[in-house]
Image (cartoon, rainbow, N blue to C red):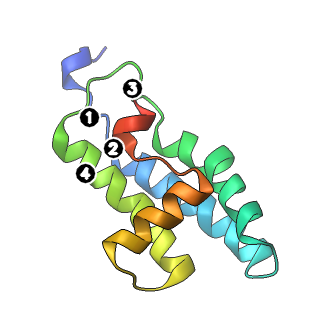
Amino acid sequence: MKVLSDLNVHSPKNKAGFYRSFNAIFGKIGRCATEEVVFALIKTKCLPVLLYETEVCPTNAADLQSMQFTINRVIIKLYGTMSQNYYQEVSNYFGINTLKELLK
């Protein structure tokens, strides 16, 4: 039995599962669905996979940054390269909060 401090919250399985979920959804609907639908599916189907175990295990700044980068990559895949301000506008418009806000 592992001790709680020995667990790695940000395991590669969570990140891989997030990408797998997103790619499965995006592969099925592609660019046919509206942006609202895509982001609603990301919030309901993909984010829980990434955030699995974060409620019971402590996260450090490196874990948060790595998980936030994962979310950023998906948004960049949908919109292409963008500035930080535009990224924040898109995230706020579709209700994709930062991980610090999600984990409060």
Q: What amino acid type should be assigned to the residue bearing mark 4?
A: Gln
Q: Is mark 4 on a helix, strand or loop?
A: helix
**Looking at the rendering, in which quadrant would you find the C terminus?**
top left
Q: How crowded is mark 2: few (under 14 residues within 10 Å), some or many (20 or more)?
A: some
Q: What element carries label 3?
A: loop
- Seen in the picture, residue 12 relative to 32 is either above or below; the reply is above
Which of the two marks, 2 or 3, is nearer to us in this view?
3
Q: What amino acid type should be assigned to the residue bearing mark 2?
A: Ser
Along the polypeptide, which appears first: circle 2 or circle 4?
2
Residue receiving disc 3: 104
Q: Marks 3/1: CA distance? A: 19 Å
Q: Tell me which corner region of the image, top left, top right, bottom left or bottom right, holds residue 86.
A: bottom left
Q: Where is residue 101 in the image (x, y as percent from the top left)?
A: 40, 36
Q: Residues within 10 Å of mark 1 (few under 14, many from 20)?
A: some
Q: What amino acid type should be assigned to the residue bearing mark 3?
A: Lys
- In the displayed structure, does residue 9 sit left or right of residue 87? left
- In the displayed structure, does residue 59 sit left or right of residue 46? left
The answer to the question of whether label 2 and label 1 lie on touching residues, with beta carbons closer than 8 A, is yes
Residue receiving disc 2: 11
Residue at the spot x=20%, y=24% of the render? 6
Q: What amino acid type should be assigned to the residue bearing mark 1?
A: Asn
Q: Residues within 10 Å of mark 3 (few under 14, many from 20)?
A: few
Q: Which mark is residue 8?
A: 1
In the image, 98 versus 69, the foreground residue is 98
Q: Residue 65 carries which label?
A: 4
Q: Marks 2/3: CA distance? A: 20 Å
Q: Marks 2/1: CA distance? A: 6 Å
Which of the two marks, 3 or 1, is nearer to us in this view?
3
Q: Position of residue 69 (x, y in %)?
A: 33, 61
Q: Is mark 1 on a helix, strand or loop?
A: loop
Q: Which mark is residue 89?
A: none
